[in-house]
Image (cartoon, grey):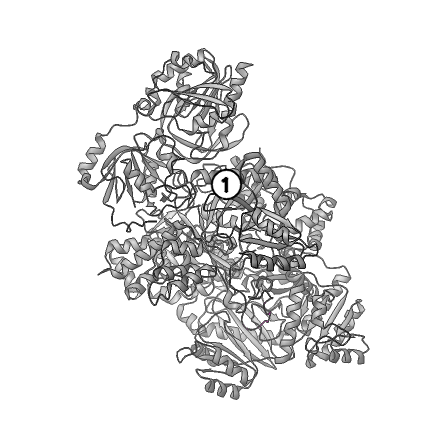
C-alpha cells in the first residue's frame, strides 16, 4: 500500500466549456490537454466499464458519483482493450484502491493510457450546467497546456462537434474475430462492430451462440459469408445520421428476414432502416438506473443507458414500414424517449439501452433469450 | 393498474414505545403511510400506544387508538371499526408479530380483514432462520450465487473436531441447540477453546447437540433496501456499506451510503441475489432489507438475513436517497405499481427507478453506556445504541466528520491535539468494537500506526482506513502551516473539519477561525438531495451543506422561521422533542410562514422532506446553524429561530446564536438562563415567594456533610454541570455521602456538587404551561404515581391528577404563573413540583417544550407545541383561544370531571444490557433517567387507564394467579383493602413473614415465602427471587423500605424484569392495578379513539 502525498503531486487543471464556463481543479491521470463532448454519467459503480466503453469515444465523461477509483483497476472488467473516453472528470479520486481483484490504481491506469482528467471540481454544478444547457464541447488542460481562459475557450471551440460525427469505424475492430460459444454451440451470429462492448458477445456466447464480430465496414456479402442464424448490430459512438453504410447493410438483412437484434447505436440504425428519423437529446441518458417499460408486458426494468441520440418514432401507434408493421416496444419512463423497436411481421428488434449491462443491472438480460428464440423460430 | 377499489378502510399498527432497536423511525414510516392512505381517500384506523409520536396525532388518521398493541386490544378495535384491511409492515417487529398472531388465532378471518403489504407465508420465510436458509439455497440453485454461512450439526466431541475441518478451520462459532437466550454459545479460536466451549455446549443442550458455524467476523458487511410491486417490478433503493465489519449490529455500526468499495460486478451480484430473494420469499408488495457479508479476500457472498418489512435501515435509506420507502410501500399495498407513483422530488419521473447519489451519507450511532455503568460496552450482534445521527457531504470525509459532530457528545469528534498514547495499546484497544472505536483508531494513527496495522487490528476496509489517514494528514498540515491560508482552510473544510477542530489544532478560539474563514469568503454551499444526481431538476428543497462551488438555495419572499430540532435520540431527549418541532412547523406553515427545519436525526418525522417547506439535514452545532441562518438570510427575510422545542440541544445554542446577531423568537436566552442558573432561579423563586427544597453547594466532603447535616438526610446529590440527572443519587447517610464524593472524579471548585433536601414522602407533580407575557394557559397537571426520587422521565403519571383537589391546582397555577412571569417565558414552560405535607416545593423549571408535551396534548386534546410556536412569534393566548387553536374556555387545569384519565408509563431498556459476565444489569430506578420510551393508557376511569398503560409497556396485568406482596411498614395499612380485592379476584397471595402476619390478622390468607436474604430453606424451600425466576409468580407488589429495603426490592425487581412479571412499587400503583384487574375481570375494558375522546372533551368544555 503506497500513499501519494495528499494532492501535492498533482498539478492544477482547468476545465473549459464551449459556453465559457470554467472549473478549476487538479490534474487527474495524464497531464496535458484533451477535447470532446462533455457528458455526465450517473452510475455509482462501474467506472472501469464506462471508461472502456467505445461509445464514449470523443466524449469527456463527468462522473456524478464523487468517489471514483475506490476499487482500483483489474483486467477482468474492461469492456474493450483500451480506455475510450476523451477525458475524465471526477470530484474525489481514491488514493488507495481496495478490492481483492484490484491490480493497480485508476490514476495510474489513466496516466498509463494517456487519458487527461481533472479532479476536485464541483461536478454537481457542472452536471446541472450540462442538464440546463445541454451537452457541449469541453476542454481539460493541465501542466503546460494551461493558458488564459480566452485562449483555452478558443481552442475548445475549434474541436469538432458530436452532431454529424461518424465514429464507428474509428473504434471498431479492423479484423473479424470469433467469440466461441460457451458449452454446446447452437447458433452462429454475425455481429457488426460499431463500437461493441466485450460483454455483448459474452452474453450471446453464454447462450450457445458463436459470435463472429465483423468490422463496421463489413458488407452484406461478408455478413452472410459466416452463414449466420442471426445478425446483431452493436452500440457505438457518433451521430446515427451519418451511419449510411450500416443502415444499408441492415436493410439487406431485413430483406432476407434473418433474425436481427440491435443494441443502442444498433437501435438507431434499425430506426433509420425502417425510415424513422433520429435526433440528439439535450443531454442524453447515461447511467445505470433508468426505468424502461416493456410495452407488451407493462413491466419495468431498471437499465443501463449510454446514448446521446434517440429514434423519433410514434409511441401511440403501429407504423407501416417497408419491412412491415413496426412499433415502439420499450420506452423510458423518465422522459418517454423511444428505447426499443420491434417489427411485427418479421424477426427483428432492437433496444436503445444495454441489456448486456456492464456496468448496470441485469434486468434486461431476457432480450438475449428473445434473440435466441427468434433464431429458434426461424429454424423451426 | 390503479388503486384497489375493494378497500375502503385500513388498520395500521404502529410500533409502540421507543425501545432500543425499534425507535422513532417507525413513527416516520407510520406517519408517512397514514398520510398517504388518507390522501387516497381511505378511512385510516391506527393503533399505537406511544403518545410521543406524530402518527398518533388526531389529524394523521381518521380514528386513532392510543391503546396497547396486543392481540386482545387490536381485536377490540377491529370489532369496533371493522376495517377491510390490515397493514402490518410499517410498525416494526411489534406490528408484524401482532398481525401474525391475529392471523393465527383466526381474528382476521373472523372479521374478514385482509392482510395487505405482506403475506404470512412470506413473513415466515423471511423471519424463520431455517426457512430462510432454504430460500437462500433455492436462490443459489436459480442464479448461482448467494449462500448462508456454512454450518455442521454435531452430537459428540469427535463430530465437533471433525466439523472444524469441514468449515475450513478456526475460528468457529459454537451454538448449543435449544438453550435459552443463546446460553453457552461462543467463538472458538483454537482446539482448546473449542473443547471447552463445545464440551460445555453439548452438556447444556438438552439434545446434546451443538451447531458449529464458520465465523464471518471481520468480513465486509452490506445492506440493500429493495421494493417490489404486484407486477413483480423490483428496485433497489439504496445500498449501505458498514464501516465496522461483521460482528457489530448494523444499528450500532457506522454505516455509509452508497456502498463505497464494490465494483459494478460485485454490486450487481448482490442486487441479483437480493431480487431473487425478495421473489423467492414472496414479498408481494412493499419493502425489504437484506444483509450480506463479503469475504474481503475473495469476494465470497453470504446472505445474513432479511427483514420482510419497513425497517430502521429503510428509514435511513429514505433519508439518504430522498426515496420515501414507507410512503411508497403504503401505495403499493393498496394496489399501485411503482411506475404509477411519481417521484416526489422530481415530480415528473416515476418511482420505478433506482436512486443515484452524488454525495455520501454517513450514519453514526449514539450510545448511552454512561447510564448503565455496569453494562459491557463491547458491541456485538445485539443492538445497544439508543439513537443515531446522519450526515451528508460531497465526500466521505466531510460526511463522516459532520456525522461525528452531529452526535453532540463529548469526544465524538476527532481530536488532533494532546497526548496520543501508545500505538500498540491503542491498536490493541481498537480490536474490541466499542462506542468511539473510530476515535481510538484515529489516536492510533496519530501515534504512528500504519494502514496495514489499523486494518489488521480492526478489519476496517483499507479504503476507509485511508480516508482516516487523509483526515489526519490534513490535521497535520493545519498544525504545521505558518498561517491559515485560504487554500488550506478551504481544503480542511472540504474534508469536514469544523471551525472548532481547526481552532483546537491552531490554538485559536472557534470564533476567530470563523472570522478568518468568513473574511476569506470560505462558506458552505447547500446542495439538494434529489434522487438522481442532478439528472432532473429537483422540486423539493432538501439540503445539505458542502464546501463546494455552487449553492442551490432559491430565494423566497415569505418570512422564514428556522426550527432547530433535537439531534440524535438519546435517553432524556427523544422523539417527544421531535414531535414539538414538527408541530411548530405545521402551525407556522398554517400561519403563513415559510418553515425551515434543521436536524440530523434520520429516524424522525422532522427530517421528512414533506414536513417543512425547507429541510437542512445538518449538525446542530453553532457553526452549522450560523451558516444556515446566513444562507437563509440571503434567500429572504428570516423572522427568527425557534430554540425552545428541540430540547436541550438547541436551547444550549440560544445565547451564542443571539450573540452572533441571530433573532431568537419566544423565550429569550436571558430568560433561559434565569431558569437554568441556580442563583438566578433562586431569585425568581424568592421574588414569587415560592419555596424550594433546602440546598447548598459543596466542593469537598466536609462542606457536603455540613450541608447535609443542616438540611437533614436523605439528600439528593448531583454534579452541577450535567443534564438528564446524570450522576444524580439519593444519599441516605453520611457513609454513602463520603463515598459518593470520593467516587465523583470531576468535583472541583468550579464544578461543585449540589446537595438538595430529598423529599421522600412527597407527591411529585409535573406541569406543562404556555405563557405569552400576560396570560397563563395551564396545559396539564401530571401527578406521578411512583415514589419521589425517581426521575420524572422514568415514572408513571396520571393526567388529570388523581389525588389533587381544586385547591392544589389553584396553588400550582399561581406558582406556575409566578415562575413563568419571573423567568420571562414566551411559549412553553415545564415545572416540577413536590407536594410534601402541605408545602408545594418547586424542584425545577425548564423554559422549553418538555418530554411530556405530546402526552399532555393528547390527554387534553390541545396542541400545546403548536400554540407555543405561535406565541413565540407574537400571538397571545387570547388570540389563539379566539382562533380555536386553544379552547375558548378553561385550560388543562380545569378539565371537566368526566374528562378521560390518561396514564403515562415509562419503558426501560434493561433487557438489552448485560454486564461483562453476561448477567442482567441492575434495574435500580433512581433520579437518573434511563427509560427509552413511554406508553399512554387512556380511559374514562383511572384503573382501566392504568391497566392499559401496563399492558402497553410491559404486557397485560394478570387477572388471576399468584401475587407476591411485600410492603414497607408505612404502607401496611393501605395494602389491606387491595390485597383483599386480589383474593376476591382469585389470586393466591405470597408474602414475606411480616406482611403475611399483617394480612392474616386482617383475615387474609397468604403463604409465607422466604426473603432473598434468608436464603434457601432447610427443606430446599425457594426464596421469592427463585420463585420469580421459576415463573411461579404472576404479580409482584414491593414497596421500598428505605436504604436496605430498597436494595432487597431491587433484587426482586431484577428478577421481575428478567421474567417480565408486572412489578408494582407503590401502594398507589397497587390500588390502581387492582382497579385495572377488576375492570379486566369484568370484561368491560373498551377502546375509544382519541377523536372520540376529544369530541367528548370539547362538548364538556363548551
Q: Label 1 belongs to which residue?
A: B270
Q: Does the magenta run of residues contain B922?
A: yes
B537 above or below B1093?
above
Q: Which of A298 and B830 lies nearest the eye of the viewer? A: A298
Residue at image position (44%, 32%) is A357
Q: Which of B1007 and B609 lies nearest the eye of the viewer? A: B1007
Residue at image position (59%, 40%) is B137
* B450 relative position to B1014: left or right: left
Quadrant of the rendered structure where residue B564 is? bottom left
A365 above or below B973?
above
Which image quadrant: the C terminus of chain B? bottom right
Residue at image position (23%, 45%) is A12
Q: Tell me the magenta residue range.
A: B921-928
Instruction: Please tell me whether the stretch drawn in magenta is mainly helix, strand or loop.
Output: loop
Image coords of residue B721 (percent x, y): 44, 73
Q: How many marks?
A: 1
Amino acid at each position: 500500500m503506497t500513499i501519494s502525498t495528499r494532492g501535492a503531486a498533482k498539478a492544477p487543471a482547468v476545465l473549459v466549456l464551449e459556453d465559457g464556463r470554467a472549473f478549476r481543479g487538479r490534474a487527474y491521470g495524464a497531464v496535458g490537454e484533451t477535447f470532446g463532448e462533455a457528458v455526465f454519467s450517473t452510475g455509482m459503480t462501474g467506472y472501469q466499464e464506462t471508461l472502456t466503453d467505445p461509445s464514449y469515444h470523443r466524449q469527456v465523461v463527468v462522473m456524478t458519483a464523487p468517489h471514483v477509483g475506490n476499487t482500483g483497476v483489474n483486467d477482468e472488467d474492461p469492456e474493450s482493450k483500451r480506455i475510450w473516453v476523451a477525458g475524465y472528470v471526477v470530484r474525489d479520486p481514491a488514493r488507495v484502491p481496495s478490492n481483492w481483484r484490484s491490480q493497480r490504481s485508476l490514476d495510474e491506469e489513466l496516466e498509463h493510457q494517456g487519458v487527461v482528467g481533472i479532479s476536485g471540481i464541483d461536478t454537481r454544478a457542472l452536471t446541472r450546467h450540462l442538464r440546463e444547457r445541454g451537452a457541449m464541447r469541453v476542454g481539460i488542460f493541465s501542466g503546460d497546456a494551461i493558458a488564459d481562459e480566452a485562449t483555452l475557450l478558443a481552442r475548445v471551440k475549434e474541436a469538432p462537434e458530436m452532431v454529424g460525427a461518424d465514429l464507428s469505424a474509428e473504434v471498431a475492430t479492423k479484423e473479424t474475430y470469433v467469440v466461441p460459444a460457451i458449452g454446446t454451440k447452437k447458433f452462429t451470429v454475425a455481429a457488426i462492430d460499431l463500437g461493441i462492448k466485450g460483454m455483448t458477445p459474452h452474453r450471446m456466447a453464454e447462450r450457445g451462440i458463436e459470435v463472429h464480430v465483423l468490422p463496421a465496414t463489413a458488407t452484406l456479402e461478408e455478413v452472410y459469408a459466416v452463414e449466420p442464424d442471426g445478425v446483431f448490430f452493436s452500440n457505438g459512438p457518433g451521430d446515427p445520421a451519418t451511419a449510411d453504410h450500416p443502415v444499408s447493410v441492415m436493410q439487406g438483412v431485413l430483406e432476407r428476414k434473418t433474425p436481427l437484434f440491435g443494441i443502442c447505436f444498433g437501435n438507431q440504425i434499425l430506426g433509420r432502416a425502417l425510415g424513422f428519423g433520429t435526433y440528439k437529446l439535450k443531454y442524453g441518458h447515461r447511467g445505470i438506473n433508468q426505468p424502461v417499460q416493456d410495452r407488451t408486458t407493462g413491466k419495468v426494468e431498471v437499465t443501463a443507458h449510454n446514448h446521446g441520440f434517440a429514434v423519433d418514432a410514434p409511441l401511440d401507434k403501429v407504423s407501416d414500414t417497408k419491412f412491415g408493421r413496426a412499433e415502439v416496444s420499450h420506452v423510458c419512463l423518465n422522459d418517454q424517449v423511444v428505447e426499443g423497436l420491434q417489427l411485427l411481421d418479421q424477426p427483428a428488434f432492437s433496444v436503445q439501452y444495454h441489456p448486456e449491462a456492464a456496468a448496470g443491472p441485469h434486468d434486461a438480460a431476457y432480450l438475449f433469450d428473445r434473440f435466441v428464440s427468434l433464431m429458434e423460430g426461424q429454424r423451426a | 393498474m390503479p388503486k384497489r377499489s375493494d378497500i375502503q378502510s385500513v388498520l395500521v399498527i404502529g410500533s409502540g414505545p421507543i425501545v432500543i432497536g425499534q425507535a422513532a423511525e417507525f413513527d416516520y414510516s407510520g406517519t408517512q403511510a397514514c398520510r398517504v392512505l388518507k390522501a387516497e381517500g381511505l378511512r385510516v384506523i391506527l393503533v399505537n400506544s406511544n403518545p410521543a409520536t406524530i402518527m398518533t396525532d388526531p389529524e394523521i388518521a381518521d380514528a386513532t387508538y392510543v391503546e396497547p398493541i396486543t392481540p386482545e386490544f387490536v381485536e377490540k378495535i377491529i370489532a369496533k371499526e371493522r376495517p377491510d384491511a390490515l397493514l402490518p409492515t410499517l410498525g416494526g417487529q411489534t406490528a408484524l408479530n401482532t398481525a401474525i398472531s391475529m392471523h393465527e388465532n383466526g381474528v382476521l378471518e373472523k372479521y374478514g380483514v385482509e392482510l395487505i403489504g405482506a403475506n404470512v407465508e412470506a413473513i415466515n420465510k423471511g423471519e424463520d432462520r431455517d426457512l430462510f436458509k432454504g430460500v437462500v439455497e433455492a436462490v443459489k440453485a436459480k442464479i448461482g450465487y448467494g449462500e448462508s454461512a456454512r454450518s455442521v450439526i454435531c452430537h459428540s466431541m469427535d463430530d465437533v473436531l471433525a466439523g472444524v475441518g469441514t468449515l475450513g478451520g478456526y475460528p468457529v462459532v459454537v451454538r448449543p441447540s435449544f438453550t435459552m437466550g443463546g446460553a453457552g454459545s461462543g467463538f472458538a479460536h483454537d482446539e482448546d477453546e473449542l473443547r471447552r466451549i463445545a464440551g460445555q455446549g453439548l452438556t447444556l443442550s438438552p439434545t446434546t447437540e451443538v451447531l458449529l458455524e464458520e465465523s464471518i467476523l471481520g468480513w465486509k458487511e452490506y445492506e440493500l433496501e429493495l421494493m417490489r410491486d404486484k407486477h413483480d417490478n423490483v428496485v433497489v433503493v439504496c445500498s449501505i456499506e458498514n464501516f465496522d465489519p461483521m460482528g457489530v449490529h448494523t444499528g450500532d455500526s457506522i454505516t455509509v451510503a452508497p456502498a463505497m468499495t464494490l465494483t459494478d460486478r460485485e454490486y450487481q451480484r448482490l442486487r441479483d441475489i437480493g431480487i431473487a430473494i425478495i421473489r423467492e420469499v414472496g414479498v408481494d408488495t412493499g419493502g425489504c432489507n437484506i444483509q450480506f457479508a463479503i469475504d474481503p479476500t475473495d469476494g465470497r457472498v453470504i446472505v445474513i438475513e432479511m427483514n420482510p418489512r419497513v425497517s430502521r435501515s429503510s428509514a435511513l435509506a429514505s433519508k439518504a436517497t430522498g426515496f420515501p420507502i414507507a410512503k411508497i410501500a403504503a401505495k403499493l399495498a393498496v394496489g399501485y405499481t411503482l411506475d404509477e407513483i411519481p417521484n416526489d422530488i422530481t415530480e415528473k419521473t416515476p418511482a420505478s427507478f433506482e436512486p443515484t447519489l452524488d454525495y455520501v451519507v454517513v450514519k453514526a450511532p449514539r450510545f448511552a453506556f454512561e447510564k448503565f455503568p455496569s453494562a459491557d460496552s463491547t458491541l456485538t450482534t445485539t443492538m445497544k445504541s439508543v439513537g443515531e445521527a446522519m450526515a451528508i457531504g460531497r465526500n466521505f470525509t466531510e460526511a463522516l466528520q459532520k456525522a461525528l459532530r452531529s452526535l453532540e457528545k463529548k469526544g465524538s469528534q476527532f481530536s488532533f491535539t494532546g497526548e496520543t498514547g501508545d500505538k500498540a495499546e491503542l491498536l490493541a484497544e481498537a480490536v474490541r468494537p466499542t462506542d468511539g472505536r473510530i476515535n481510538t483508531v484515529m489516536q492510533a494513527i496519530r501515534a504512528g500506526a500504519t494502514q496495514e496495522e489499523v486494518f489488521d487490528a480492526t478489519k476496517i476496509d483499507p479504503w476507509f482506513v485511508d480516508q482516516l489517514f487523509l483526515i489526519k494528514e490534513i490535521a497535520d498540515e493545519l498544525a504545521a502551516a505558518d498561517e491559515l491560508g485560504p487554500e488550506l482552510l478551504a481544503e480542511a473544510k472540504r474534508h469536514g473539519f469544523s471551525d472548532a477542530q481547526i481552532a483546537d489544532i491552531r490554538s485559536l478560539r472557534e470564533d476567530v477561525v470563523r472570522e478568518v474563514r468568513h473574511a476569506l469568503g470560505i462558506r458552505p454551499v447547500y446542495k439538494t438531495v434529489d434522487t438522481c444526481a442532478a439528472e432532473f431538476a429537483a422540486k423539493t428543497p432538501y439540503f445539505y451543506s458542502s464546501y463546494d462551488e455552487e449553492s442551490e438555495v432559491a430565494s423566497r419572499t415569505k418570512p422564514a422561521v428556522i426550527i432547530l430540532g433535537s439531534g440524535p435520540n438519546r435517553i432524556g431527549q427523544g422523539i417527544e422533542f421531535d414531535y414539538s418541532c414538527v408541530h411548530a412547523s405545521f402551525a407556522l406553515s398554517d400561519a403563513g410562514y415559510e418553515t425551515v427545519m434543521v436536524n440530523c436525526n434520520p429516524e424522525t418525522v422532522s427530517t421528512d422532506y414533506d414536513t417543512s417547506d425547507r429541510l437542512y439535514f445538518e449538525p446542530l452545532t453553532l457553526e452549522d446553524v450560523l451558516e444556515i441562518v446566513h444562507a437563509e438570510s440571503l434567500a429572504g427575510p428570516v423572522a427568527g429561530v425557534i430554540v425552545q422545542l428541540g430540547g436541550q440541544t438547541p436551547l444550549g445554542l440560544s445565547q451564542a446564536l443571539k450573540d452572533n446577531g441571530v433573532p431568537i423568537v419566544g423565550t429569550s436566552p436571558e430568560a433561559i438562563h434565569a431558569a437554568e442558573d441556580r442563583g438566578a432561579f433562586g431569585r425568581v423563586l424568592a421574588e414569587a415567594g415560592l419555596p424550594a427544597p433546602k440546598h447548598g453547594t459543596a466542593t469537598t466532603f466536609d462542606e457536603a456533610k455540613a450541608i447535609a447535616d443542616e438540611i437533614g438526610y436523605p439528600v439528593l446529590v448531583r454534579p452541577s454541570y450535567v443534564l438528564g440527572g446524570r450522576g444524580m443519587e439519593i444519599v441516605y447517610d453520611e457513609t454513602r455521602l463520603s463515598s459518593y464524593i470520593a467516587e465523583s472524579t470531576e468535583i472541583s471548585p468550579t464544578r461543585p456538587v449540589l446537595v438538595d433536601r430529598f423529599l421522600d414522602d412527597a407527591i411529585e407533580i409535573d406541569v406543562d404551561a404556555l405563557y405569552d407575557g400576560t396570560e397563563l394557559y395551564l396545559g396539564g397537571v401530571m401527578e406521578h404515581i411512583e415514589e419521589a426520587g425517581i426521575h420524572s422521565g422514568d415514572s408513571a403519571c396520571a393526567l388529570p391528577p388523581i389525588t389533587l383537589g381544586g385547591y392544589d391546582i389553584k396553588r400550582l397555577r399561581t406558582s406556575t404563573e409566578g415562575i413563568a412571569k419571573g423567568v420571562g417565558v414566551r411559549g412553553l414552560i415545564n415545572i416540577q413540583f413536590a407536594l410534601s405535607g402541605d408545602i408545594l416545593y418547586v424542584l425545577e423549571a425548564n423554559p422549553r417544550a418538555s418530554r411530556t408535551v405530546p402526552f399532555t396534548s393528547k390527554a387534553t386534546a390541545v396542541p400545546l407545541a403548536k400554540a407555543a410556536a405561535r406565541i413565540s412569534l407574537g400571538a397571545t393566548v387570547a388570540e389563539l383561544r379566539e382562533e380555536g387553536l386553544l379552547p375558548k374556555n378553561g385550560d388543562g387545569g380545569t378539565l371537566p370531571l368526566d374528562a378521560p384519565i390518561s396514564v403515562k408509563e415509562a419503558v426501560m431498556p434493561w433487557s438489552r444490557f448485560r454486564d461483562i459476565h453476561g448477567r442482567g444489569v441492575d434495574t435500580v430506578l433512581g433520579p437518573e433517567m434511563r427509560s427509552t420510551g413511554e406508553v399512554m393508557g387512556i380511559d374514562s376511569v383511572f384503573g382501566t387507564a392504568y391497566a392499559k398503560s401496563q399492558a402497553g409497556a410491559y404486557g397485560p396485568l394478570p387477572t388471576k394467579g399468584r401475587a407476591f406482596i411485600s410492603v414497607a411498614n408505612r404502607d401496611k395499612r393501605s395494602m389491606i383493602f387491595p390485597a383483599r380485592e386480589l383474593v376476591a379476584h382469585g389470586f393466591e397471595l405470597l408474602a414475606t413473614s411480616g406482611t403475611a402476619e399483617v394480612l392474616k390478622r386482617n383475615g387474609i390468607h397468604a403463604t409465607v415465602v422466604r426473603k432473598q436474604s434468608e436464603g434457601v430453606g432447610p427443606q430446599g424451600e425457594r426464596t421469592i427471587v427463585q420463585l420469580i425466576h421459576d415463573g411461579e409468580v404472576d404479580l409482584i407488589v414491593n414497596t421500598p423500605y428505605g436504604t436496605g429495603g430498597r436494595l432487597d426490592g431491587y433484587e426482586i425487581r431484577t428478577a421481575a424484569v428478567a421474567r417480565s412479571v408486572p412489578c408494582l412499587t407503590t401502594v398507589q400503583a397497587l390500588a390502581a392495578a387492582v382497579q385495572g384487574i377488576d375492570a379486566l375481570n369484568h370484561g368491560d375494558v373498551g377502546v375509544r379513539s382519541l377523536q372520540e375522546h376529544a369530541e367528548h372533551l370539547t362538548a364538556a368544555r363548551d
